[in-house]
Amino acid sequence: MSEVVLIFLELLHFIKMVLCGRDFMQSKSLLGSYFKTIVEPYKMFNELQEKPNTLRPFLIILLSGIILTVVTFPHTFKEIKYLFNLDSSISTTVVVFFIFTFLICGSVIIEWVMLSVLLYFIISLLSPAISNFRIVFSVAGFSWVPIILKTISFATLVLITGEVFEP
C-alpha cells in the first residue's frame, strides 16, 4: 500500500515540476491556484491567511454545481416529465434546466457559506488568532478543490455508463 502512495506522490511531483514547471506554480493564474491546492496545500492555505481570495473558490464551487447539473439533467428531466406529466417542448426543457441549475448551484453555494460560518464560530472559540471571516471563507472554498475532482470523475462515469447513481 505504501508503494502505491509513493508512486502517486512521485507522479504528482513529476507533473508539478516537468509538465507544469515552476512558472505555473508561481503564477497567480486560476488553474495554478487550484493545482497548488492539491500539490502544495500547506503553502496555499498559508498564502490565503495573508491574502484571502473568495472569487476563485466561488468559481470552483459554481463549476462543480454546473457540471452536476449538465451531467444529471437528462436523467432527472425524464423523472420530472413523468412525475408532472410535462411535454417535451424546448421551452419546457429550458425552463426546467434553468430551475435545476439554480437549485443545484444555489444549494452548493449555500453549503459553502454554512460550512464557513460553522468553521468560523468553532475556530473563533478555539483560537482568537483568526478573527477574519474572509480567511475562513476562502480556506473553506479552496478545500472544495478535491471535491471538484470527485465531481469530474462522477460526471465522467455518468457519461460513460449512462446511469446516475449515488456517489
Image (tube, rainbow, N blue to C red):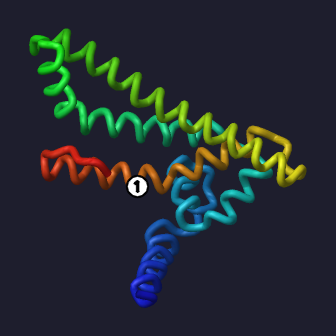
Q: Is residue 2 left or right of residue 94?
A: right
Q: Residue at x 24, y 16 (%)?
A: 94
Image location (x, y in percent) of residue 10: 46, 82
Looking at the picture, which amino acid does disc 1 mark? Leu
Q: Residue at x 58, y 62 (%)?
A: 25
Q: Residue at x 78, y 50 (%)?
A: 123
Q: Mark 1 sits on what residue?
A: 149
Q: Is residue 150 left or right of residue 143?
A: left
Q: Is residue 30 left or right of residue 52?
A: left
Image location (x, y in percent) of residue 145: 50, 52
Could you say which is closer to the camera, residue 125 or residue 2? 125
Does residue 4 lie above or below 110 as drawn? below
Q: Examine the image and state in which quarter residue 131 appears.
A: top right
The answer, for residue 53, to whether it is visible in the render is: no
Image location (x, y in percent) of residue 32: 54, 55
Could you say which is closer to the camera, residue 139 or residue 126? 126
Q: Residue at x 37, y 34 (%)?
A: 66
Q: Residues within 10 Å of mark 1 (few under 14, many from 20)?
A: few
| Element at label 1 | helix
Does residue 90 lie above or below 105 as drawn? above
The answer, for residue 17, to whether it is visible in the render is: yes
Q: Quadrant of the N terminus?
A: bottom left
Image location (x, y in percent) of residue 160: 15, 52
Does residue 67 lie above or below 105 as drawn? below
Could you say which is closer to the camera, residue 124 or residue 9? 124
